[in-house]
Image (cartoon, coloured by chain):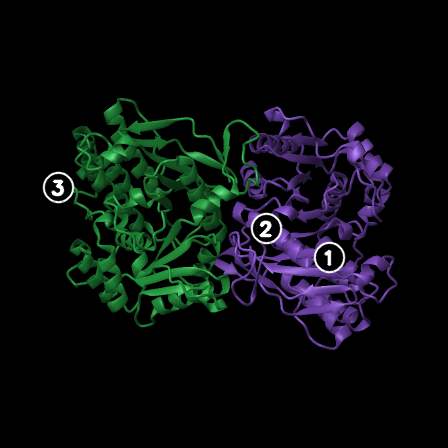
Chain colours: A green, B purple
Amino acid sequence: MRLADSFRSERFGAVRIHELQRVIELDSGALDDAFSAGSRVVPPEAIRAVESQMVIVVPCMNESRSVIEGVLSGIPHDCLIVLVSNSDQLPVNRYEIEAQTLEQFCRLAGRSAISVHQQDPGLAAAIKAAGMAELIGEDGLVRAGKGEAMLIGMALAAMTGRRHVGYVDADNYVPGAVHEYCKAYAAGLHLAESPYSMVRISWHSKPKLRDGRLFFSRRGRSSEITNEWLNRFLAEYSGFGTEVIATGNAGEHAMTLELGLKLRLAGGFAVEPYEYLDLFEQFGGILESASPDVMASSVPVLQIETRNPHFHDNKGEEHVQGMRMQALNVVYHSPVTLPAVRQAIVEFMVAQGALEVGQEPPRERVYPPVGSLDLELLYDGLDAEALTFRQFDGRASAGYPAAPPIERPGIPRPTV
Amino acid sequence: MRLADSFRSERFGAVRIHELQRVIELDSGALDDAFSAGSRVVPPEAIRAVESQMVIVVPCMNESRSVIEGVLSGIPHDCLIVLVSNSDQLPVNRYEIEAQTLEQFCRLAGRSAISVHQQDPGLAAAIKAAGMAELIGEDGLVRAGKGEAMLIGMALAAMTGRRHVGYVDADNYVPGAVHEYCKAYAAGLHLAESPYSMVRISWHSKPKLRDGRLFFSRRGRSSEITNEWLNRFLAEYSGFGTEVIATGNAGEHAMTLELGLKLRLAGGFAVEPYEYLDLFEQFGGILESASPDVMASSVPVLQIETRNPHFHDNKGEEHVQGMRMQALNVVYHSPVTLPAVRQAIVEFMVAQGALEVGQEPPRERVYPPVGSLDLELLYDGLDAEALTFRQFDGRASAGYPAAPPIERPGIPRPTV
């Protein structure tokens, strides 16, 4: 893969946010240098080295079988797949259909995967036993929400012993886009050269129906707002306006697990913008950091603009408004957000009709780091009680010795 | 890339048409065997070996700059790009914009390309000098039409000395789909294991606007008809109904140049279905073959169903009806089509209102094989007279010795 060079970055303590980099070529051949100024080539071996250490988590809710099949086909072979489903189990058990699709794919492609249903009582029990009762709702199950699914996915990723985790939404109609996201994760994590790095995707465009024809919109409806306020957050500190953050709502992103295990994830759709805030809180140098090792290193955030259009299911206006406000809530409530920005957020939300005068934005749920989980207890709970917990080992179907992605003796001790 | 195995094929003389094979994984990692039954893995080195011998021809007519950029970004680095444009040159010179886009891409990506405009008087003169006056219309220029653009592209491909040529339409909104097509060409040509092989793409689905929402149609409007009649052509010989041909109209296809240089291409949109008929005419064993070497070998046609949706500009109903009828015209007029099929075609066309009772379907133009061109004379003509003929050498911009894709001493002698 060939990326445009990133010449500029903004620092916020140990956090180094790189300007958006375009993908120039999806496949840059076997070259290991650039042959040209202004671009960086990541050769296939370097990409494969990252992929073979990468888990791709696919949060999934009620997608059709053919869309899921397409997404799976786009995930590079060397990545391990983790499906976290929150699909309906009644009247039709959609999770069973998803798990079958995954199993069939693994058998055909000779690869490995893990799946679990977010509402599985056994999963909730295992999470509780492993030490994160915060994730459990009043019904005794893991709370619904995208952030919660991502947290589960990260915990499973950590148990495999792999070093990277990436997220890909299940509602993507373009397998080639999924493929590009994963390649961009690997290329970015390779270029970032830090054990604490993150790669966030900004898609090239989003096709929308408008007046009976397709319009390729450059910016998502909630991304514009989220990015604007994250940039105001930075500008209020530096005194210089900035547009450096272009991926505040990036559902498609990846990180090293060494970083991921330290992050506190937010619930619902606050999860993606809150990642930025948690980086600022933990590694921004404003509050005291619990991780002097990270502070001594740096936390690069690479932002990559992919070539493919992001062509997915339209979840409607309500969904977008919800996402937008959840992003503002987390900026507002962060202890490192300066008062002027907090004040402006309240005014904006009132003007948008999202808040009554005199009200405070609601607080989003924020969970402890995944690194605080006892992974061995989590495994024991899943193994014993979670009926939807499945491990697929495609190589076993071809007569190779079975090697499930997670095995008890192989579970790494949390590093945090 | 991992493809489903093709277990069945139909023979027609030396032509061996393989049943449609699905793409299972876009990227199958570094594996060189399958780990599972029912699929074939083509490892990256094998794909790269084909790509480094492949020219990708992009016929282009009035596409927007950003769509072209996307298509270019999806073509694997090791492939050489040939752009054959028939875009408007007035009031705005769109060809100049295209050539600039191509040049900029080559500079950024350090790669090589060739471009030419189909209506360039110098091109027409060069083609005439090289021995194919049939391609020149009454206005003294190369005839407009997609088949004609493909023929020019194949001639340029032959001059580079590379061994394979593939075609990718310029109106594709999904760079990842272009990428998948090229990978499928390479995988297919590798698996075909014959110097005379062809790979044709059947896209997974085609998104269409219907009642304000997207519907993923499985079959194109003209493909259904074309495939049906090509299959009837075969069935009339074998006495067994068949659905083996699924790629009669495949704009996306590739072949070895050893095969390509022998093929007679048809003009306009008849070009793709006519490739099948010319294979049947030349290598079907019904008429005497001018190529006993090919007859002694075999001509595999691999058909690959890609994962990405084919998401392109909607050219309208008239365009589709035109394509459909051109396909029927070439089936009707082929000397190897049996009388019962010819009769049925006439009845069908009359019923469709495409033909009056008692009329005969019009004849499509069919050109001599590209292998009959004198490539050295063609080069001399292009070099001396074709003002739109450009060669881009991206490596030169980084200080490497200039190496244009076509050089006079390097031009291979036609093999036919």
Vertical order, B412 against B1 (above or below): above
Q: Is residue B107 above or below residue B49?
A: above
Secondary structure category for the residue under label 2: helix
In the rendering, which numbered label is found on residue B194? 1
The residue to which callout 2 is attached is: B183
Q: Regarding mark 1 in the picture, which secondary structure is present there?
A: loop
Q: Amino acid at mark 2?
A: Lys
Q: Quadrant of the N terminus of chain B?
A: bottom right
* Nearest to N terminus: mark 2 or mark 1: 2
Check the image and report above or below for A76 versus B401. Answer: below
Give me the C-alpha separation between circle 1 and circle 3: 74 Å
Reply above or below: B386 against A64. above
Establish whether labels 3 and 2 are both on one chain: no
Dot 1 amino acid type: Ser
Question: Which residue lies at the image location 62% right of the left edge and 56% below the top edge?
Answer: B201
Residue occupying image coordinates x 39% and y 37%: A303
Inspect the image, locate mark 3, and give the three-letter code of the amino acid beneath it. Answer: Gln
Residue A13 image offset from top left, x and y in percent = 26, 29
